[in-house]
Image: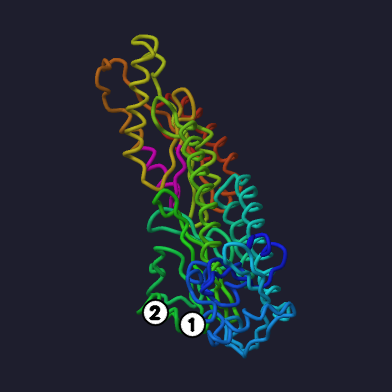
Amino acid sequence: MLAEVARMQPFPRALIDRSHVVVDSNMALEVWAGRTSESLVGMPLATVLGVDPDELAAALATGNPGGIRLASTTHSYQGTRSSVVIRAVRISGGHTIVAFDPELAAVGERTSALGRRESDRLQLLLSASVAFAKTQSEEELGELLSETARRAFNATACSVHTGEPGNYTLVAGDNMLAKEWPKDSQGKAVPLGGVVTVQTPAEADIVAPGLGLSGVFERAGVSAVIGVPIIEDGVLYGAFACYFDQPRTFDDQAVPLAEALAQLAGQVMVRLRLEARLRRAAMLDEVTGLPNRRLFDENLQQTELAHTDQVAVLFVDLDGFKAINDTLGHAAGDTVLKEVAERLSSVFRQEDMIARYGGDEFIAALQVGGTSDALELADRARAAIAQDFPGIPTELNITASVGIAIADAEVADRSIDHLIRLADQAMYAAKRGGGDQAVVHGIER
């Protein structure tokens, strides 16, 4: 019955027994008393109200339908003192419903506001779940998470950081602390075993001692931060942080909301990375394990080339490979291709990109200092390929014709396809010259 009454009006109500001990309560009483329902149950109503037990007993005994005003009492809602008007309705079983007078409408409004806020947060999470699920990349997810978290917490800014363990980078939003972060501590970050809330600059030194973060906060104009790890199945995928340029107190729903957003993002992150692995696996050459032409092109598009002087594309075509297939069969040919891939991988550097471009053709994109560097690498590749292959008769020797095209890095970054075509033309020039040589496009050697 009390639940029915509580739904009708959002004002403080309690169900008490014959001894005036609370048996049940509604949300409004919890807000007004500053206590949970579990702590209210079993507590004398006089203690809850902060009034004399005898005065309360006398008031309840009168049965005045107009209500009884009790002496002023201090309660947790807004830390105020006020008189309390109660109305008592006896029900069966020796229980009584005690209702507070609607003059405490602020409590009802507060309770309604809490309900609206909960509804708003639930709607935000539902909307975020739908929007996150539609993202197709970590960058897109990061942008959406940054904006959603910023709006959810009414923050000044929000930053999202993702990556691999020990190497997380900013992928979306604005990190307000970045410019002021101590230069000798760039590799350090606030430990995020869980949600971290910093409500004042001074608290930052407690959360991460030794970094001087209170000064960082003050210089950056940041008053408060909430930092949230993105963890799924025990794996840390990154974190997001909201920054506030005004003092901020986080309520008891801030951490659950932050955790819910992080969980949604983490679930999508798992899906995106799985899809990326599957997509890349589909773009690996089955014979050599090298990237195929499509993945090579994609890697080039995602790689910043402008930090080096020049970029060279090497187009490698095997001389004599057709005889291997015709004489020994395609299985032997596949063995040769796999061995060539391993030899090229050992010749080229870690930062270079190589791929099987099709048939007996391989391609590499190299960061070089000039033509001589490119030719040196091409000759090393030819020398590696020219070595004997296990199980292949020496008369079926394999060599390589290499075509080279070079451009300034900034030019290559904009027209890499054109550079590939020039290297292909140079490779055919090497073939026409008898093979087993390297030719630079536009230069006679």
The quadrant of the picture occupied by the C terminus is: top left
The quadrant of the picture occupied by the N terminus is: bottom right
Q: Residues within 10 Å of mark 2 (few under 14, many from 20)?
A: few
Asked whether 282 falls inside the magenta stretch, the response is no
Please say if 163 is above or below 281.
below
Please say if 154 is above or below 218.
above
Amino acid at the residue labelled 1: Pro
Residue 24 location in percent, x, y? 55, 66
Of 33 and 289, which appears nearest the observer?
33
Q: Determine if residue 336 is in view.
A: yes
Q: Which residue is mark 2?
A: 206
**Residue range corresponding to the magenta coloring:** 364-379
Number of numbered discs overlaid on the protein picture: 2
Please say if 343 is above or below 309.
above
User: Which of the marked residues, 2 or 1, is nearer the chain's N terminus?
Assistant: 1
Q: Which residue is mark 1?
A: 201
Residue 402 location in percent, x, y? 44, 33
